[in-house]
Amino acid sequence: MFPNLNDIDFKDEPYKFFSSSPNTDDKTISTWLDWFENQAPWRLVETDFYEQHEFSLLNMDLPECVSILAHEDTLNHVKSKVEELFNVRLSSNLEVIAHKLVKGQTIRIHNDFLNINDRETHRVLLQLNRNFDESNGGFLMIFKGKEPEDLVEIIEPISGSVQGFEISSESHHAVSTIHSGERYTVVYSFREIVND
């Protein structure tokens, strides 16, 4: 089952975000990683602020060993937890994208904010990797502004840990350069229901 998200450190500054300690057993995580490493249909995506491999876990025939990551029960569980933590109502229109970063790749400072209707408003990240060590790089970095000197927090991508945040014009974050190994993340993106 998806991590229970019980041991949560929630912060309001510089924007609303949380981090949760790992509570998924190592065997389950290893099974997920086996599939991501050897069978997942990765495709390289390049934008102005990142280069990474990714694919959607929705609308595809996933093997049983990883299907729990995009199962309806899992999506409802994560959605309800985000609604509780951020005091919002979310629509059922969501995305589940797997990301892979390899040596030399980085994600520069950005905020994910799009000033459009029906935009993504909240994001949850499930970190997956083997034998994480600080020397690997790939840290999630939280900023109070769009400059490197605005760094306020560094979060280790410990396998099985979960982070989440509210997407806004202020939600500046980045991922430090990967120096060795591979960094996998399952990204759940939600849309708030806004009453007119």
Image: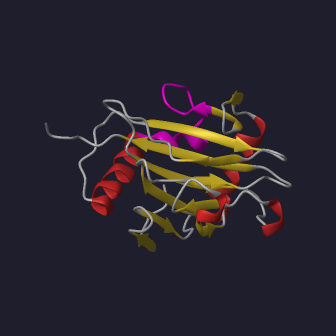
Q: Position of residue 94 (x, y in %)?
A: 39, 36
Which residue occupies the foreground of this view, 142 or 52? 142
Q: Is residue 160 visible?
A: no
- Above or below residue 62? Residue 31 is below
Q: Position of residue 32 (x, y in %)?
A: 65, 48
Which residue occupies the foreground of this view, 137 or 81? 137
Quick one: which residue is furthest to the left in this view? 196
Q: Which residues are magenta?
A: 55-71
At a point 64% along the width and 41% down the height, the residue shown is: 99
Is 70 a magenta residue? yes
Q: Quadrant of residue 46?
A: top right
Q: How many marks?
A: 0
At a point 53% along the width and 60% down the height, the residue shown is: 162
User: Which quarter of the figure is the C terminus placed in?
Assistant: top left
Coloring basis for residues: secondary structure
Which residue occupies the foreground of this view, 13 or 96? 13
Is 62 a magenta residue? yes
At a point 61% along the width and 31% down the height, the residue shown is: 55
Q: Position of residue 36 (x, y in %)?
A: 70, 41
At a point 54% along the width and 68% down the height, the residue shown is: 23
Q: Is residue 84 visible?
A: yes
Q: Is residue 191 left or right of residue 151?
A: left
